[in-house]
Amino acid sequence: MCELAVHDKKMTDEMFFPFFEIIEREAWDNRNFVRKAVNWALRQIGKRNEILRLKGIEAAKRISNQDTKAARWIASDALRELNEEKIIYRVRNKTLNKKEGIKIS
């Protein structure tokens, strides 16, 4: 999921939507590498563009309602990063560039 989010520029937003279901389903798993992988996938997909950032925030909020330590950690870490000023600016800038074909510095 992370590799696709970062490297596959041809994937549409809709192709990432099923990944949120998988991320939410596996967020309970407290094994270290699973927890980190789920968190990483959520953050990378959310940083792809503004639509996916908002979908990622929605998924993180649903994950935070799960009653496990792993889920709460995943949600809080993803929400922290996806709501950072610099991330919001970069994602919105990227989204505008794609729509308008210009670069804002």
Image (cartoon, grey):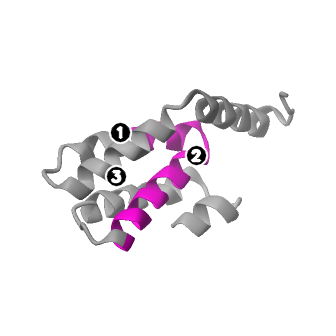
- Residue 59, located in which quarter of the rendered image? top left
Distance between the Cα atoms at labels 2 and 3? 15 Å
Side of 6 relative to 68 (left or right): right
Q: Which residue is mark 1?
A: 58
Q: Is residue 44 above or below residue 93?
A: below
Picture residue at 24% right of the left edge, 44% below the top: 64
Q: Are the two marked residues, 1 and 3, in contact with CB atoms closer than 8 angstroms?
A: no
Q: Secondary structure at mark 1?
A: helix
Three-letter residue code for mark 3? Ile
Picture residue at 25% right of the left edge, 54% below the top: 71
Report the front residue among 35 and 92: 35
Tell me residue 12's x, y (percent): 60, 55
Side of 98 relative to 51 (left or right): right
Which disc is residue 90 wearing?
Answer: none
Picture residue at 65% right of the left edge, 31% below the top: 92
Side of 56 relative to 97 (left or right): left
Three-letter residue code for mark 2? Lys
Sequence-first tag of 2 and 3: 2
Q: Is residue 8 visible?
A: no
Three-letter residue code for mark 1? Glu
Main SS category, magenta section: helix
Q: Residue furthest left?
A: 67
Which disc is residue 47 wearing?
Answer: 2
Q: Is residue 87 above or below residue 14?
A: above
Q: What segment is highlighted magenta in the picture?
A: 33-57
Question: Which of pointers 1 and 3 indicates the residue nearer the eye?
Answer: 3
Which disc is residue 74 wearing?
Answer: 3
Distance between the Cα atoms at labels 1 and 3? 13 Å
